[in-house]
Structures are given as C-alpha cells and as structure tokens.
Image: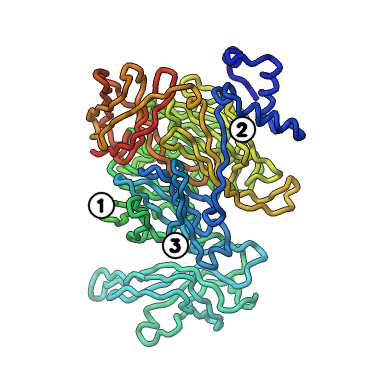
Amino acid sequence: MKIRNAGRARRFALGSTVALTVAGMNAPAVLGFAGEQYHQYAINRPDYKAEYGHWQTVTLPAEFRINAVHATLLRTGKVLIIAGSGNDQKNFDAGTFKSLLWDPAANTYKLVPTPADMFCGGHSSLPDGRVLVAGGTLRYEALDGSVKKAAGTMRVRNENPEAARTFPRGTVFTAPNGRAYASTAEVTVPAAVKTGGGDRTVVTAGEQHVFVEAVAPGADHVYNSPAQYTIKGLTGADARNLYGMSERMTLEKQDFQGIRSAFEFNPDTEMYEQVTDMAYARWYPTLTGLGDGRVVTVSGLDDTGQILSGNDNEIYDPASKTWSKAPDRYFPTYPSIFLTASGRLFYSGSNAGYGPADKGREPGLWDLGDNSFHPVPGLRDPSLTETSSSVLLPPAQAQKVMVLGGGGVGESPLSTARTDIADLSAAKPAFTPGPDLPAGGTRYLNSVIMPDDSVFTTGGSADYRGKHRSDLLKAQFYHPDTNRFSTAAEPAVGRNYHSEALLLPDGRVVVLGSDPLFADKADSEPAVFEQRIEIYTPPYLFHGERPQLTGSPGGAKLGGTITVSTPNPEGIATAKLIRPSSVTHATDVEQRSVALDVTGRSGGVVSLTLPANPNLLPPGWYMLFVTDGAGTPSQARWIKVTA
C-alpha cells in the first residue's frame, strides 16, 4: 500500500512497526490464521478507518439475491437493481426476469415484477424521478459449433401502399428449395409508399427485418445464396405483395439480440409502467438525459444481432412518452456520452463490448442541432478504451471528463493503467495525461463522484472478465485538485464484468455484481455470478461530527436561491447537488456534481444559489450535500430541480 502522506500517517500515532504492518495489509499477502486475525484487527482500528475507510459485506437472504447487472439510485433513497434474466439462459428460457428494490438505510428489500428481459438494456433518470429503461434481450447468443438450426435476417417487404401488415412470431417463410424458416419475433411491415401518378407512378415497398431460423435442425437448411421467400398462408394479391428477402441462412455464430420495449419505473408505486416501444431494438444501448428533460438513445445490437448502423438513434420525450428520430451518428455499444454545459454531447471513447476496432472509437463533441462531430484529440492508448470507465469530474462547472483504464477490443487480454482528462471548456478541447492507475492495467473499473469532490474508484480486473484470477482487490481516490490518487481500504470481493458502484445519500458507496468467466487461475472451472453486496464507508465519516442539514425545500428553480437550515452556518464550506447514479457495464453518464454558490450565512440558515444552465444542471432529482472545511459531508437532502 502506498501511503500518500507519511507525515499524515505518523499523526495517527501508530508506532513504526504497526505502521509498516498495516501498510502490508493492503496487499492480499497475509498468510495463516494469525495473520488474518491481525489483518482484521488492523483494518478495524479507528485510525486506519480515518485514513483509508472501511468495507462491510452484505449478504441478502437467498430468495432476494439476484444477479445485479444494472443499478439506479431512486429519489426515495432505495436502489433499483435489475437482473432481468441475469446472463443465465436457463432463466431466459423459463421467462424468469428479476428486479430487486433495496433500501440500504433500512436494509429492507423486495422483488419487483419485471415484465420483460431488461438484461443489458439501458436506463436514465427522468425529471420527475422515474427511471426510463429501454431495450434488453430478445435472444441469447449461440457460439460457433453450438448452432443447430440454420438462421439469418429476413427482410420482409410489403408492396401494398394501402396498409401495413403485422406477422406474429412463428410466421413461416419458405425458400425456393422448399426449406422453411420461422420468425423469432413479431414483425410489423409498413405500407409501401406510392409517388408520382399515371405512367410515372413509383411504388417503393415497405420493409422491416426479423430474425428467422429453420423449423428443423441440420446442415440441409443452410442456404448460401440471396433469395426471395414466400410467406406461408398468403394467397392471391397478398402473396404477390408480401414476401421475404434474405442474403443467406447459416449455422454460424449468432449474437445476442435486442428488444424494442421501453418502460418507466415509478418510485411511488414501485412498479414498471410500459411506454411506447422504440422504433429499433437495442441490446447494450446508452441513454443520456438532455437539458430539456428528453433522453437520447444510441447504439446497441438489434433484433437480428447486428450492431445498429447509427441512422437509428432515437430521442424519448417523457411528456408524450413517445420516441422520435435523433441525428445520425455511429457508436460502439454502451458508449459513454455526457451532456456538456454547451448542450453538446461528449463521447469520451469509453464503450463496452461490440463494434469494429476501426469505427466509432474516436472521442469528440456531438452537436445534435447540426449533427456535427468535432474530434477531441490526445487520448493515449486509443485502442484500449473498451471496458474503460469515464466520469465527469467534480465540479461539473469545470467541464472535465476523465477516462480511466480499459482494455482491447473483444476478448483481448490487454489492459491499460492510463488515465487522461479532456478539458471541454478550452477553446480547443483536448486530452492531457492524468496519473496512472495505482493497480496497473485495469478493465471494468467503477468510478463514483463523492461529496468532497474526490472520485472513488474500485475493483476491476487486469484481464478480460477476470481471467487467470486477475481481479484487482484495490480501491483508491482520485483528487481533481491535486491530480493524484490516494489509497483506500481494500475490498474483500473481486469485481469485473457486470458490476456497479454508486453513491448513497448518507455518503457511503455501495458496490454490487460481478460476472467472471472462471473461478480458478487456470481458467478451467466455471465461475458463478457474484451476489454479495459491499458497502464502503469513506474516511470522512470517521472524522467526528459531520455537518447537519435540519431543513431544506423540496424543490428549487434553475438560477434561483434556496435557504437550508443548519445549526452551524459558519461551518459550511461548500454545497453541491449530486445527480444519482444509473450505472451498468462501468458506464454511468448520469452522475454529476454541480457546485452551488454559498451566498449567505446567518440566523441558522445558509443561502445557496443554483446555476441557471439546464445543460449543466439538467432538471430532475438531486442529493444536496454540504461539507465543512475538512470535506466532511452532511447526510443528503433530496431536492427536485426544475426549469
């Protein structure tokens, strides 16, 4: 363990022998029962906690344990944890989809009816505190050698300009050689479009795709030539106007497929409410909230397992609960896209999992108004941005985004310790180097903005999905003011793929999930999904009395001033609004910390003024924290920010 300030360590009055031993506790090298006993003694000493913080492990009753793939903090203080099928095909085949609502303060929990497989969908908090969840899983992947039925994409065409046509799941398409293929989902084909008139009438067929697979297994259903397919059951004009087109039917690997479904989770009823489907199916999408309360949705795998091309981005309007087309722009899956103070969207280069190595990887600023894209240069190790973490550094007014770690495309074993910081407020935004990650090359790192303006980072692995037992039992704080890392207490549980971390209203951090491939260093024993939860208590909560907020308004206006009650107004040094996290796959574009101006202190109250810019402070629910001069935060109060 690296002690960032030897003088500070000595001020805790540890003897030199004890100090050296405690330092060794941050490496998993303590052997034997006696060593473990001393380790537990050392990490539970008050002076150790005050320097490095403290971890506790929470194990829920068996009936409430789920595979935490997604986590969102609600304005009620509860955490919505979504598993869907939880990366378990048996659950998927059985239609067993789960969500858990957990209250960390009361340590209560309940399972929530989950109407679709939201596994690997996207999510974003809406201005009223609801959570938009869009996309998920239509079909699990089938690897090379395991595909039993030939399959492929069928483009269903409609040459009738009078009406659209819907075909149910299981509709049979017949090839010229008589082989039959059934659709795996319902498909609605729009009507044809007729233009011109008379002899110059042009009819352009309506078209929609659907994935189909052979009705029987075997290589004799492989069809390697483009062909037109008839639709079983149609006769006469319908048979002429409606048909399928496919390039080929193969036994090749099949990727995951997405769904079009979208829901809002209501924190009052604690139920999902279905809203209008997206126009495009998505698996691994990113949802980013805009300053006007709408949500832009990009990328993902569609319902045939193909990555979306970029001309299929959509915007959700919570007022009408409908979707509309967004400007065209291609991104790899789960891209980290942040709303900036200018209203433009910044793509940091971080992403997760799918897309070619030579397309859509360059960071830049995307203007939804004119669909321009301005590259932001200077990111080092640009080929190692997959499974990296990105965070809008506190305070949000600084307009700096940090990229931390990452790995190579796909199942690459490569990882990087690189951190770089993009200054988006500069006349010519560019990345500059940050300090290397203390643990070395790291993928799947979780990063959490803290009330004292530090960034807590934890977990990750050096290799793809923790292969070769490469999980990193390390945690640290990044300090934007000094551009340095400092050591935190070690977690006890390894975290890699499908893990999350988020800030709680009491100033602690909860860490969930992890989905390693193997349980042993030789990569011979399959691993199980990690269902233990850890809670990290930062050092600032071991520094004595914390500031108190005894009263605050329930709402605040952009550009307005509010007053909050506190027993010691003169002791309040800073105030900030922190947007609650909505995180999956090391991707959390929701969290941001916006500094408030402390404009007055008197008579048991403090006056705080909010920024007026909705792109800096998007309308919605926030945690209000105040801190004292030492950086110790209060318990948060929830405030709804409106335009």
Q: Which amino acid, mark 1?
A: Ala
Which residue type carries mark 3? Ala
SS category of the residue bearing label 2? loop
- In space, the residues marked 1 and 3 are separated at their CA atoms by 23 Å
Is 21 in front, or is 513? 21
| Sequence order check, earlier mark of 3 and 2 | 3
Residue mark closest to the camera, 3 vs 2: 2
Q: Would you place residue 91 above or below residue 265 in this image?
A: below
Residue 66 disc label: none
Q: Quadrant of the N terminus?
A: top right
Whole-percent x, y for residue 460 in the image: 59, 39
Q: Is residue 394 left or right of residue 56?
A: left
Question: Which quadrant of the figure contains the C terminus?
Answer: top left
Specify the amino acid type for callout 2.
Answer: Glu
Q: In terms of depth relative to the viewer, which is nearer, 201 or 189? A: 189
Distance between the alpha carbons at the discs numbered 3 and 2: 37 Å
User: Which badge, 1 or 3, is on the more N-terminal residue?
Assistant: 3
Residue 217 lies in what quarter of the image? bottom right
Q: Which residue is mark 3?
A: 116
Q: Helix, strand, or loop for circle 3?
A: loop
